[in-house]
Image (cartoon, rainbow, N blue to C red):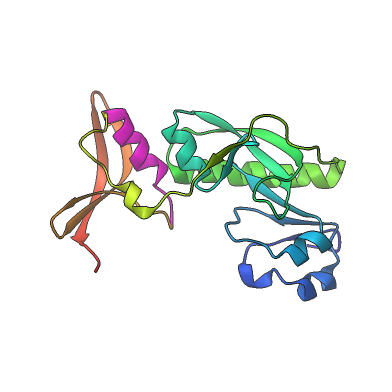
Amino acid sequence: MGRQLASIHRKRTAHNRELRKINPRYIFFPHWSWLVPNSILTEFNCICFHMTDLPYGRGGSPLQNLIILGHNKTKLSALKMSPELDAGPIYLKESLSLEGSATDIFKRATETTFDMINTIIKSTPSPTPQQGKVVKFTRRKPAESELNSSMSLEEVFDTIRMLDAESYPKAFIELGNIRFELSDVYKSGNELKATVTIHEKSE
């Protein structure tokens, strides 16, 4: 990536020794879910991307929490990483639609992320402190992906689509030892249609 920047995608590459060889002006962490050691945060200019209009929505599972709360659009925030999670100053924000499946949303977010990286490299903006009321999100647990009888049809639709991406626990229904996992949901008149995968529950 040259001596001006580094892009970290794998946990094992986030080490001071390797980064010193590059001596980057910026280190970008796109779609990153691990804690970065404080030694790296203090030595290098680290920037990550969070799918909320910070300081609203600090914390885990931002996409799912936003959809559950009824949002159909958000901001993608590029922020300087700090020891306090999602609390660093902001370099840049861009609008992001929350329509479609989680896969669709992540594809848009990826395109926007790399556009933002190019903007930051070219314009070298100074980060500004976050302003507004801090609202924290909690990381969702796999068990929360279960559909239940209290949900409306719209809530079922949103739950299926917001979990429809690689590595996410799919929305599911359980009957005894059998699990029904749902994906590829779409609306057809007053009905929902989806792909269903049926298997025995894992022990």
Question: Which part of the image, by quadrant, shows the N terminus?
Answer: bottom right
Give the residue furthest to the left.
176
Residue lying at the far bottom of the rendered structure: 17
Q: Going 23% across and 33% down the picture, which residue do you hit?
A: 150
With 6 as the anchor, is 64 left or right in this view?
left
Q: Residue at x 81, y 55 (%)?
A: 45
Residue shown at 83% from the left, 73% from the top: 21
Left or right of 66, for residue 22? right
- The extreme top residue here reads 189
Asked if residue 161 lies in the magenta stretch, the reply is yes
x%, y% of residue 182? 28, 47
**132 or 69: nearer the viewer:** 132
Residue 24 percent across, percent down from the top left: 84, 62
x, y percentage for residue 203? 24, 69
Q: Residue 157: percent from the left, percent from the top? A: 32, 35
Residue at x-position 45% and y-position 31%: 69
Q: Nearer the viewer, residue 157 or 141?
A: 141
- Report the magenta residues as a range: 153-166
Query: Quick one: 103 or 162, which is closer to the camera?
Result: 162
The residue nearer to you, when weighing 78 against 182, is 78
61 is higher (above) or lower (below) than 10: above
Q: Does 121 lie within the magenta span?
A: no
